[in-house]
Image (spheres, rainbow, N blue to C red):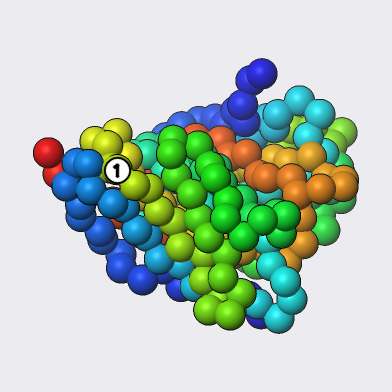
Amino acid sequence: EAGVVQSPRYKIIEKKQPVAFWCNPISGHNTLYWYLQNLGQGPELLIRYENEEAVDDSQLPKDRFSAERLKGVDSTLKIQPAELGDSAVYLCASSLSGQGIHEQYFGPGTRLTVT
Amino acid sequence: AQSVTQLGSHVSVSEGALVLLRCNYSSSVPPYLFWYVQYPNQGLQLLLKYTSAATLVKGINGFEAEFKKSETSFHLTKPSAHMSDAAEYFCAVSKTSGSRLTFGEGTQLTVNP
């Protein structure tokens, strides 16, 4: 079974430029998460999708960040414009909701450097 | 609000020694608890999860954790460290299954030969 796929793995951009990250969850997983991980810290949730619906986006800085999950499968996270402080690793995770405790499976992340 | 505290940002042990990584949580409701491991330039891999079926939880790679409600702790242990255990370890809590994970700051484990 393929894991969570993210691309690109690394991205270097100048500040004020736009950037987008893509995530393909594990097949059949209806819940998708985007986390932000700053250096030396644990990940923090940006947004959670149940199918196509964003059900938890309270930590998403909506002035510059946006996300979508069309058709309830792949997802894209966008930053426009990027700031120096956005340099971090962006992790995507997926899980299968329903009865029981369903763990979140993480992708390898996209490491963003803003110069 | 939930929070997780991991005591010790860096832990160093000798190969073959006991590994003990500490995690304390605060939660207003019975929590779901997890331990994840992260190797350099990789995503997080689940080591184990607390399901409320048993207070002692066994995970992969010989790790286990004990849930102690009275101490609000979920410490991770391994009887004998291996060089391949060197990585960053994160304790996490969620309010319900599938909801957001709240992570601790992480503990970097170093294993010395």
The quadrant in which the N terminus of chain B is found is bottom right
What residue occupies the far left of the structure in this picture?
B113
Q: Secondary structure at mark 1?
A: loop
Residue nearest the observer in this picture, A1 or A56: A1
Q: Identify the residue shown where x is 31% and y is 52%.
A: B19
**Which is nearer the eye, B111 or A108?**
B111
Query: Which one is in front, A114 or A94?
Result: A94
Q: Relative to residue B24, is residue A88 depicted above or below?
A: above
Q: Chain of mark 1?
A: B
Q: Position of residue B50 (x, y in %)?
A: 64, 55
Residue at mark 1: B80
Mark 1: which amino acid?
Ser
B97 left or right of B106? right
* Left or right of residue B62, residue A68 in this image: right
Q: Residue at x 48, y 49 (%)?
A: B64
Q: Position of residue B23 (x, y in %)?
A: 46, 67
Where is A105 relative to B55, above or below?
A: above
Residue B85: x %, y % from top left: 32, 40
**Is any atom of residue A65 visible in this view?**
no
Picture coordinates of residue B12, whole percent (x, y):
20, 55
Residue occupying the point 54% across, 30% down: A7
Q: A69 left or right of A5?
A: right
Residue situated furthest top in the rendering: A1
Q: Quadrant of the C terminus of chain B?
A: top left
The residue lying at 34 percent from left, 58 percent from top is B20
* Mark 1: few/some/many CA within 10 Å (<14, 14-19, 20+): some
